[in-house]
Amino acid sequence: KERSLEVMTDTIPLILSFCDVEELCRASCVSRTWNFLAQNDEYWERLCIKRFGLSSRGFRPPPNPTKVLYILTHMNFKRTCGPKLCSNDAFTGMRRQNFPSLPRVELSNFLQ
């Protein structure tokens, strides 16, 4: 049992580091352990940078958890651009600098 726990703590984070958003959300449904590990800010920070070109370090105070930044930014793009542009296929690899006319995402807009 101790060996299996050791394998899990080494292997699961490695698996999660390769996940996209949908896969990370699905992985969080596997068990409480996977859910806890999938909430790690490092995964969500990487996904925010990859998909939106945003880092939680650019906000004061930084969002906690970083997953909030991902969700709110996605919602803002979806509302601004429309659902077709924000679909997974069309949205993959999109960067904020590609759309200079889009308003800056402010967390305060969503937390009122």
Image (tube, rainbow, N blue to C red):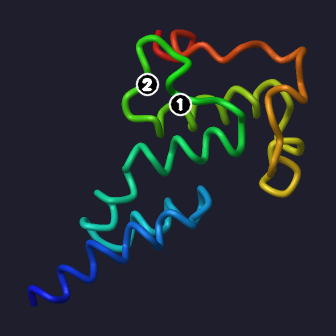
> Front-most of 23 and 9?
9
Q: Is residue 32 above or below residue 2?
A: above
Residue displayed at 77% across by 13% down: 103
Q: Is residue 9 above or below residue 89?
A: below
Q: What residue type is labelled 2?
A: Pro
For mark 1, does the 10 Å Cα neighbourhood hold few (<14), some (14 to 19), or many (20 or more) residues?
Answer: many
Would residue 74 appear left or right of 17 to someone viewing this image? right
**Label at residue 69:** 1
Q: What residue type is labelled 1?
A: Leu
Where on the picture, by quarter, is residue 63? top left
> Front-most of 101 and 56?
56
Residue displayed at 37% across by 49% down: 40
Alpha carbons under labels 1 and 2: distance apart: 6 Å
**Mark 1 / mark 2, whichever is N-terminal:** 2
* Spot occupied by residue 51 in the image (x, y as percentages of width and height): 71, 43
Would residue 77 appear left or right of 66 to someone viewing this image? right
Quick check: marks 1 and 2 in contact, CB under 8 Å? yes
* Spot occupied by residue 72 in the image (x, y as percentages of width and height): 58, 29
Instruction: Identify the residue position indicated by label 2 in the image.
Output: 63
Residue displayed at 57% across by 46% down: 46
Q: In this view, does 8 lie above or below 70?
A: below
For mark 2, does the 10 Å Cα neighbourhood hold few (<14), some (14 to 19), or many (20 or more) residues?
Answer: some
* Spot occupied by residue 55 in the image (x, y as percentages of width and height): 58, 30
Would residue 110 appear left or right of 13 to someone viewing this image? right
**Label at residue 11:** none
Residue displayed at 53% across by 31% down: 69
- Residue at the far left in the pictured view: 2
